[in-house]
Image (cartoon, rainbow, N blue to C red):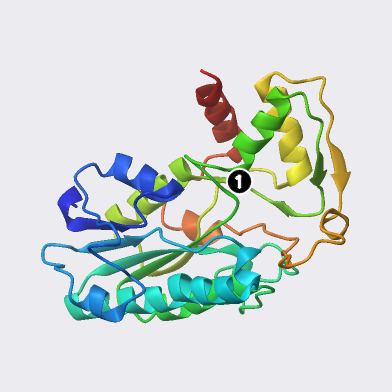
Amino acid sequence: MNDSEIFIVGANGQLGTALRAQYPGSQFADIGELDITKADSVSGFDWSGIKYVLNAAAFTNVDGAETPEGRVASWKVNASAVANLARVCLEHDMTLLHISSDYVFDGTVQPHTEDEPFSPLSVYGQSKAAGDLVAALAPKHYILRATWVIGEGKNFVRTMLDLAGRGISPTVVGDQIGRLTFTSELVRIIDHLLTSDAKYGTYNATNSGQPASWADITRQIFTLGGFPDLTVTDTTTAEYFAGKEGIAPRPLGSIMSLDKLATTGFQSRDWQDDLKEYIKKEQA
């Protein structure tokens, strides 16, 4: 696989940034050159020489998607744009790799397997489920379902380190359970699938390790970051958002089965090991 055969969609996001570092010779375009939400822009783009389209673009404002404007935007980016990419991948015999989410499920079945029926709770989740359906129409496709993504840019770990640096002991949700997925691990998974001739289809793609709540993860962040005197108070999701308007419902269970990914020969890294490395880099 040659880097120049790879086209990254959403190249400036957390995952897109990590993918560009992994594939420095890859191609990408700004919205002025390629607007994936417009069918004519996608069909009219010069795809010559491209074999792999990696779609890291997404509307990820979960609560914003509940607004009239956000509902339209989330469906345009998370569903309609994916259909445009799937269509062009079919026409040009390209492989589509699309990033999905645990939000396509309601979180009641644990762990989530790749063949679990869709049951999204929110507009964001609905738009991501629709994106999965249309991505699968590309004959050559990989759909990767990630959870709680951490990379470059604004994210949970950086937010908690910022609070710690200001001496704030936060109240954090303790009834949502899952694993962090570092972009470094997602990139490893993507590279493995593309270079190992793994079967096309849907794969859960997260770090491995003991599942934990956001509150427990915060405690680990504080310990690893050198803030042992700060405390974390648990709350429920319902209590945390009580009285707030425009809040999207969240799945409480986000544990993904990694058995299918393991059958391809991939060994996932423990999220706690990646968290240690991430915090070291942040504080270096």
User: Can you tell which quarter of the image residue 147 is in?
Assistant: bottom right
Q: Residue at x 48, y 57 (%)?
A: 261
In this view, the residue in front, 101 or 127, is 127
Q: Residue at x 80, y 36 (%)?
A: 170
Q: Is residue 157 above or below residue 195?
A: above
Measured as percent of width and height from the top left, residue 159 is found at 64, 37
Q: Residues within 10 Å of mark 1 (few under 14, many from 20)?
A: many
Q: Is residue 102 above or below residue 2?
A: below
In this view, the residue in front, 116 or 69, is 69
Measured as percent of width and height from the top left, residue 29 is found at 24, 57
User: Can you tell which quarter of the image residue 198 is in?
Assistant: bottom left
Q: Is residue 253 above or below residue 228?
A: below
* Element type at mark 1: loop
Asked whether residue 102 appears in the rendered view, the answer is: yes
User: Can you tell which quarter of the image residue 93 is in?
Assistant: bottom left
Asked whether residue 125 appears in the rendered view, the answer is: no
Give the amino acid type for the residue marked by disc 1 in the picture.
Answer: Leu
Is residue 238 toward the left or the right of residue 248 in the image?
A: right
Is residue 156 toward the left or the right of residue 150 in the image?
A: right
Is residue 231 toward the left or the right of residue 3 in the image?
A: right
In this view, the residue in front, 196 or 41, is 41
- Number of marks: 1
Measured as percent of width and height from the top left, residue 86 is found at 32, 76
In this view, the residue in front, 98 or 162, is 162
Is residue 241 toward the left or the right of residue 5 in the image?
A: right
Q: Residue at x 72, y 64 (%)?
A: 250
Measured as percent of width and height from the top left, residue 102 is found at 60, 63
Q: Which residue is mark 1?
A: 180
Q: Residue at x 62, y 65 (%)?
A: 64
